[in-house]
């Protein structure tokens, strides 16, 4: 079985304490793998650590413990190793307008990567192919333009072209379509799918939008307060969710006819992670248990094991039979 | 095969020039600077040392403006107009040189303080804040007094006291630029610190450096004239500050000889305005907000 | 002040500029709470943000306005209380309880603002004054409009905060000390402060997480139904509006392209743009959208360059020749109205629609 | 100007505010006091370097007036402690300064400290009155100009302040002096005294003395105000313009508030905070202005003392004025930070 394109093993990232608040466990033990040619969606509320995890996957954030592996080999953080690694894993950001230097035209923005990695031979051809792969046809018409002359969708395509110019094998996208118009959203998602089929690219897409997972993801992982609580094939997780948090997320989606489970309380705080199962203070299933039920102490006291990287699984004490 | 070639960058310069020369303040500013610079540079052609020499003065004492002396004469009888033109040389030279020193130093410190957040950045930031707490004129006076009278000591004094303003400004702008996502994208592409500063931060901070330069020159000229007025300039050198100083110490003020007192002051105001208006016009066009709209 | 006849027979539905969403059940004797007639807004020099919008709303009715950036939906919302910047040239009529807002003098306008109609803005963080406590900001309109003592105003503020689920003791807190969800609740409490007849919610939950968004939407719909307040909710997400509003209006390039009962529109969208908008947010479990995201090629319309014919033509997969030339209006379509030649029964349409837009414009994909 | 200040205001508004912003009051106060002390020490180092290290040989400078043979010079050098290592001299220097012993003036054969003591009050009076008037006038004008951005009022206000900013203070003083004392055209001569703080040999009740001093204060104060208030107009105007686009103003208008209330109750409090910081950061320029004005009007303050110290140059006296002026600016900055703390609820709350 070939090594996954990108993998996190027992990854922990803790930010130092600030102003009287404890250390923030943004990522609190995560195993997650993105197979070759596979698209994985990582879904979670804001503040659950998904953006930190995405940045760790491209080597922008050093893990406190655990490791990030690229095609099986652990990522070293010496400047040379990181630079070589950064050629093959590319990052997409949410705000396309902000992700482009206003003083750089499209040609320079796309040529930035190759120039940094010394791929100067045939630079114009490389930029041209990247632009057309990203759907900006005819490329010559866009090369001299500046970011403020482009629409949101076109700006995101320039960023994608900038990534493709380095012939990456994995794309890590942090909310790639969240700030785009609804109509343009589908176009960019379809582009990511096309790149998977035409270039065999793998992709980790981080988002809060379950619809996006249904649109393009092969596998889905749901993250809560720094840890993955459920993962598996998109059809299983989205249609037959087993973790109460996933069920709650799906139930409140507009347009579904399921009766909505509206969780109480405020979004989780990574500096104060509850004991036992970290979701129990907001969990509807835990609240439904009557006070005498023995399993309550499980939820409040016993920590849950970290899910393995690939096998579909659920992190909850109140699940009867294992995943189908 | 590829129809694509790296597009030229001159387009931007032409676009900037087009906008710049349509703004009234820009045209006025550049016109003023042009007139003064040309006058100052060509001065040696039509002003001979005799005109400036007190011993060979030909006009009457503090004579009012006349056909021969359009701006009247000073105490020893020299033509105020010629003194004024020659005085421009000192003020412009000291102002510009002091500013170049200050802006280069200030921009470097501002850029580094903004980019390297950790100890280097905080260290430079604290250095700037401590330095800013010291009032500039008393410091400049002390420096000039100790270094002895003359243009070089004034230039050094002004440079040392005006770099902090630029440093604070560039640091603030660097922080805003570094907060933009394209810096993180550049880092993810593999750019190192130097590449990020040179290729991404500097071009976005350059407009502010340009604007801050014009404003620093304006401030430097005001400082130079103040220092020379207080007697720290080279008494033998003719400059606007000394002209006003002589008007003050001499009897011009008490005898109400306005034609000896007004011209140097008005010249200073006009030159300083020239620099500020040019700076404001450049800033208006290169304003980052304008670029991204 | 033009005397407005109290009872107005509703305009015939077909083709009339004022169209009445079907949500209201035959209660047309009382003047509509809000009636917008042929509203045009152009921002100097040439940005035609709103190009002839007409709609009406009865007491207790809720209308969802969907559209993307540049569709003019927020401009319509702001024009209801004449909050547009001075660079805006506005024409048409906006009748709030029969009185035209556009022709009110400033004194009367200020009396109407927040008392008759209030607004919940999108970015609650920036829509609240960062240096004043939330209690002060909620009390401000009460003291201004209802002329009550500060003690009564404090009590009302506490009651409002409880009603929206924010503990009353937080009244002394500053906006930066609250979470995104709490700030949005404060905005809602502030909007209800003077018991208005109409609340305009401009993308109230866009910046919030799914769970908090659900809490806020549920809160808004409960409060609105309880107090029988009419509401106009604006969003780019069609499914959010369908869940919360009786009627639905879809806007594109400054005009309403489809309007009608929200369930009917969601079940059977008649305008191609509405179809594209609803498919952009897939229903989980629908095999059609599995591994098949759908979007629209081309760019959102540029309000400076809107030519004749249907503005959606360049991006419409079912466009044909007439679409480029013939002007479109809101014609009856199913139980609502749609501005598209496809809904016209007559044969004005040419025999075979040419294959979408790719043929005509060489415009690169968006 | 607006964008330069925007960046400045951005930094002041916490765009890059250091972390102490959210810490408790005492750590905030402690941080600021530490910063002020370090500034004071840095200033002492600068002063020491300028006045003791840089000048070639203070004794030679001193000996220039009256002939002394080498032996006397050596004794003098020892007496002044110039033969000690530099760091040792620095410690003595700091010790003396903190005890208020600033050495003796070469010119006036009087201790620098006593000289400064006499001249402190006039400067405080001049700077105090000028600053108060400038802040009030500048902020008031800046708010109105900024609020009606682009109007005729705005253009004239910013035009006038731009010109006034470009006027050298000392020259403006001379012009006003010529106009109001010597008289020109319609203005009668002798309207205001030509300088000093009180008419020599003035006798009369306490109240008459105050009247006389005020009569002397008007011209210097007017000169200083004209130059400083122009800066405050620009700063405040730019800060208000930054707030113009903020959504909370739209909320305020939507609530039905009158335009004046929207400005007074919402825009001004938000715009005031960054302006206050930038204004207090530029306190040093007021001290600079005071030196020029006191020199022109021979107003018996520290500024005029600095000018008089330049004659020889009287290094100990110059050093004394430099230290006192700088220390006063550092203290003013400290007060500014405390004031900002009170004004900005985002900070005060923690």
Image (tube, rainbow, N blue to C red):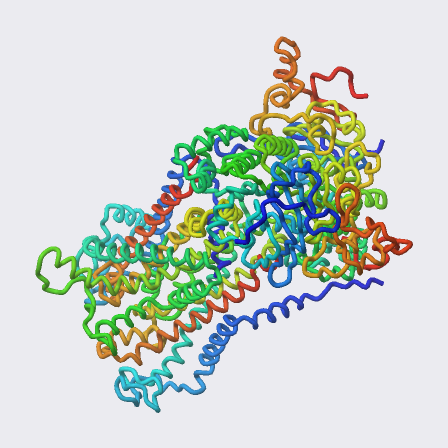
The quarter of the displayed image where residue C361 is located: bottom right
Is C21 drawn above or below residue C363 in the view shown? Answer: above
Q: Is residue A235 left or right of residue D102?
A: right
Q: Residue at x 44, y 30 (%)?
A: C155
Is D166 drawn above or below residue B199 in the view shown? Answer: below
The quarter of the displayed image where residue B158 is located: bottom left
Residue A152: x and y, percent? 70, 51
Do we see residue A166 in this rendering?
Answer: no
- The image shows a total of numbered marks equal to 0
Is A259 drawn above or below residue B219 in the view shown? Answer: above
Of A157 and C80, the residue lying toward us: C80
Is D110 drawn above or below residue B256 in the view shown? Answer: above
Q: Is residue A71 left or right of residue B168?
A: right
Do we see residue A79 in this rendering?
Answer: yes
Q: Residue furthest right?
A: C351
Of D113 and A181, the residue lying toward us: A181
Residue D152: x and y, percent? 45, 65
Residue A110: x and y, percent? 73, 54
Q: Residue at x 62, y 8 (%)?
A: A292
Q: Is residue C27 left or right of residue C149?
A: right
Residue D48: x and y, percent? 33, 54
Q: Residue at x 27, y 82 (%)?
A: B75
Q: Residue at x 41, y 57 (%)?
A: D144
Of C143 and D183, the residue lying toward us: C143
Which image quarter is the C terminus of chain D in?
top left
The quarter of the displayed image where residue B7 is located: bottom right
């Amino acid at each position: 079985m070939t090594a996954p394109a990108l993998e996190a093993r027992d990854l922990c990232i803790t930010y130092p304490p600030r102003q009287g608040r404890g250390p923030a466990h943004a990522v609190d033990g995560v195993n997650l793998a993105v197979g070759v040619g596979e698209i994985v969606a990582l879904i979670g509320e804001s503040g659950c650590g998904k953006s930190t995890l995405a940045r760790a996957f491209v080597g922008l954030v050093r893990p406190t413990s655990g490791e990030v592996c690229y095609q099986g080999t652990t990522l070293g953080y010496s400047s040379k190793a990181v630079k070589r690694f950064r050629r093959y894993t590319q990052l997409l950001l949410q705000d396309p307008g902000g992700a482009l230097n206003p003083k750089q035209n499209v040609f320079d923005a796309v040529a930035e990567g190759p120039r940094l990695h010394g791929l100067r031979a045939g630079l114009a051809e490389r930029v041209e192919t990247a632009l057309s792969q990203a759907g900006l046809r005819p490329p010559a018409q866009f090369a001299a333009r500046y970011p403020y002359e482009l629409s949101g969708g076109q700006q995101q395509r320039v960023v994608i072209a900038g990534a493709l110019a380095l012939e990456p094998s994995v794309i890590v996208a942090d909310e790639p379509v969240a700030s785009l118009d609804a109509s343009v959203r589908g176009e960019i998602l379809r582009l990511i799918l096309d790149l998977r089929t035409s270039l065999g690219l793998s992709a980790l897409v981080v988002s809060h939008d379950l619809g996006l997972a249904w649109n393009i993801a092969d596998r889905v992982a749901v993250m809560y307060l720094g840890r993955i609580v459920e993962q598996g094939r998109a059809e299983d997780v989205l249609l037959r969710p087993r973790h109460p948090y996933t069920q709650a997320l799906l139930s409140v989606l507009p347009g579904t006819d399921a009766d909505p489970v509206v969780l109480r309380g405020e979004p989780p705080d990574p500096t104060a992670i509850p004991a036992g199962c970290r979701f129990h203070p907001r969990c509807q299933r835990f609240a439904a248990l009557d006070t005498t039920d023995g399993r309550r102490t499980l939820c409040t006291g016993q920590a849950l094991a970290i899910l393995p990287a690939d096998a579909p699984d659920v992190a909850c004490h109140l699940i009867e039979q294992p995943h189908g | 095969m590829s129809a694509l070639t790296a597009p030229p960058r001159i387009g931007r310069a032409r676009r900037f020039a087009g906008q710049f020369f349509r703004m009234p303040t820009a045209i006025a500013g550049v016109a003023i600077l042009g007139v003064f610079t040309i006058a100052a540079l060509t001065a040696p052609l039509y002003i001979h040392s005799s005109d400036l020499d007190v011993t060979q003065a030909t006009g009457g004492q503090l004579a009012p403006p006349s056909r021969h002396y359009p701006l009247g004469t000073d105490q020893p009888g020299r033509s105020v107009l010629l003194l004024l033109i020659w005085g421009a040389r000192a003020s412009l030279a000291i102002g510009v040189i002091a500013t170049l020193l200050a802006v280069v130093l200030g921009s470097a410190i501002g850029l580094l303080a903004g980019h390297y957040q950790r100890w280097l950045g905080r260290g430079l930031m604290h250095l700037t804040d401590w330095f800013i707490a010291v009032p500039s004129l008393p410091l400049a006076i002390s420096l000039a007094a100790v270094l002895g009278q003359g243009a070089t000591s004034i230039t050094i004094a002004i440079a040392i006291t005006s770099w902090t303003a630029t440093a604070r400004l560039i640091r603030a702008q660097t922080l805003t630029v570094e907060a933009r996502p394209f810096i993180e994208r550049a880092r993810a592409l593999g750019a190192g610190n130097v590449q990020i500063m040179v290729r991404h931060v500097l071009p976005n901070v350059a407009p502010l450096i340009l604007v801050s330069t014009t404003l620093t020159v304006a401030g430097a000229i005001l400082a130079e004239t103040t220092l020379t007025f207080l007697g720290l300039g080279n008494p033998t050198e003719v400059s606007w500050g000394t002209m006003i100083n002589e008007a003050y110490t001499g009897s011009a003020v008490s005898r109400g000889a306005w034609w000896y007192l007004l011209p140097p002051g008005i010249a200073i105001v006009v030159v300083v305005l020239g620099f500020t208006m040019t700076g404001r016009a450049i800033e208006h066009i290169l304003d980052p907000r304008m670029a991204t709209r | 002040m033009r005397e407005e006849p109290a009872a107005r027979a509703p305009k015939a539905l077909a083709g009339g500029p004022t169209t009445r969403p079907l949500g209201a059940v035959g209660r047309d004797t009382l003047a509509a709470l809000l009636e917008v007639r042929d509203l045009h807004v152009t921002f100097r020099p040439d940005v035609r943000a709103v190009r002839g919008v007409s709609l009406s709303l009865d007491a207790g009715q809720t209308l969802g306005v969907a559209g993307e950036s540049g569709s003019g939906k927020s401009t319509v919302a702001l024009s209801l209380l004449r909050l547009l910047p001075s660079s805006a040239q506005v024409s048409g009529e906006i009748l709030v309880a029969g009185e035209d807002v556009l022709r009110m003098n400033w004194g009367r306008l200020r009396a109407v603002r927040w008392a008759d109609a209030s607004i919940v803005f999108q970015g609650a963080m920036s829509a609240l004054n960062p240096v004043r406590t939330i209690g002060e900001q909620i009390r401000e309109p009460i003291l201004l409009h209802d002329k009550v003592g500060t003690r009564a105003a404090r009590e009302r503020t506490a009651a409002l905060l409880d009603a929206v689920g924010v503990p009353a003791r937080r009244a002394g807190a500053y906006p930066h000390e609250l979470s995104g969800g709490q700030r949005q609740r404060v905005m809602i409490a502030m909007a209800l402060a003077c018991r208005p007849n109409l609340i305009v919610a401009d993308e109230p939950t866009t910046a919030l997480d799914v769970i908090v968004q659900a809490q806020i939407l549920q809160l808004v719909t409960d409060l609105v139904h309880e107090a029988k307040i009419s509401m106009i909710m604006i969003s780019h997400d069609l499914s959010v509006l369908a869940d919360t509003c009786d009627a639905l209006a879809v806007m594109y390039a400054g005009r309403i392209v489809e309007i009608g009962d929200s369930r009917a529109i969601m079940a059977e969208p008649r305008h191609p743009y509405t179809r594209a908008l609803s498919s952009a947010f897939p229903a989980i479990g629908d095999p059609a959208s599995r591994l098949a995201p759908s979007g629209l090629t081309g760019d959102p319309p540029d309000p400076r360059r809107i030519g004749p014919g249907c503005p959606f033509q360049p991006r419409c997969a079912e466009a044909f020749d007439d679409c480029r030339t013939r002007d479109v209006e809101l014609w009856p379509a199913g139980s609502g109205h749609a501005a598209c030649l496809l809904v016209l029964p007559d044969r004005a349409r040419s025999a075979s629609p040419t294959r979408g837009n790719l043929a005509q414009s060489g415009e690169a994909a968006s | 100007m607006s964008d330069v200040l925007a960046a400045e205001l951005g930094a002041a508004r916490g765009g890059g505010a250091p972390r102490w912003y959210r810490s408790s009051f005492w750590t905030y106060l402690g941080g600021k006091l530490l910063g002020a002390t370090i500034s004071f020490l840095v200033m002492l180092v600068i002063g020491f370097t300028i006045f003791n290290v840089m000048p070639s040989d203070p004794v030679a400078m001193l000996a220039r007036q009256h002939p002394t043979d080498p032996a006397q010079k050596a004794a003098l050098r020892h007496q002044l402690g110039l033969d000690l290592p530099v760091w040792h001299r620095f410690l003595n220097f700091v010790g003396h300064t903190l005890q208020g012993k600033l050495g003796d003036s070469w010119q006036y054969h009087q201790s620098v400290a006593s000289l400064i003591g006499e001249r402190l009050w006039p400067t405080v009076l001049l700077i105090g009155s000028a600053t108060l008037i400038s802040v009030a006038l500048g902020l008031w004008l800046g708010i109105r100009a900024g609020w009606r951005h682009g109007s005729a009022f705005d253009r004239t206000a910013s035009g006038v302040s731009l010109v006034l900013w470009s006027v050298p203070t000392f020259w403006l003083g001379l012009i006003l002096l010529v106009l109001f004392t010597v008289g020109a055209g319609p203005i009668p001569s002798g309207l205001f005294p030509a300088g000093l703080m009180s008419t020599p040999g003035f006798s009369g009740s306490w109240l008459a003395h105050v009247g006389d001093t005020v009569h002397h204060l008007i011209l210097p104060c007017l000169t200083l105000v004209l130059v400083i208030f122009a800066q405050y107009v620009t700063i405040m105007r730019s800060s208000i313009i930054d707030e113009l686009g903020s959504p909370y103003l739209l909320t305020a208008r939507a609530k039905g508030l009158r335009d004046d209330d929207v400005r007074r109750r919402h825009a001004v409090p938000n715009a005031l905070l960054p302006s206050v910081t930038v204004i207090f950061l530029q306190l040093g320029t007021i001290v600079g202005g005071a030196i020029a004005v006191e020199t022109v009007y021979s107003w018996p303050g520290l500024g005029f003392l600095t000018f008089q110290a330049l004659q020889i140059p009287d290094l100990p006296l110059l050093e004394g004025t430099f230290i006192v002026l700088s220390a006063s600016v550092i203290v003013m900055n400290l007060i500014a930070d405390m004031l900002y703390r009170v004004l900005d609820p985002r900070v005060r709350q923690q």
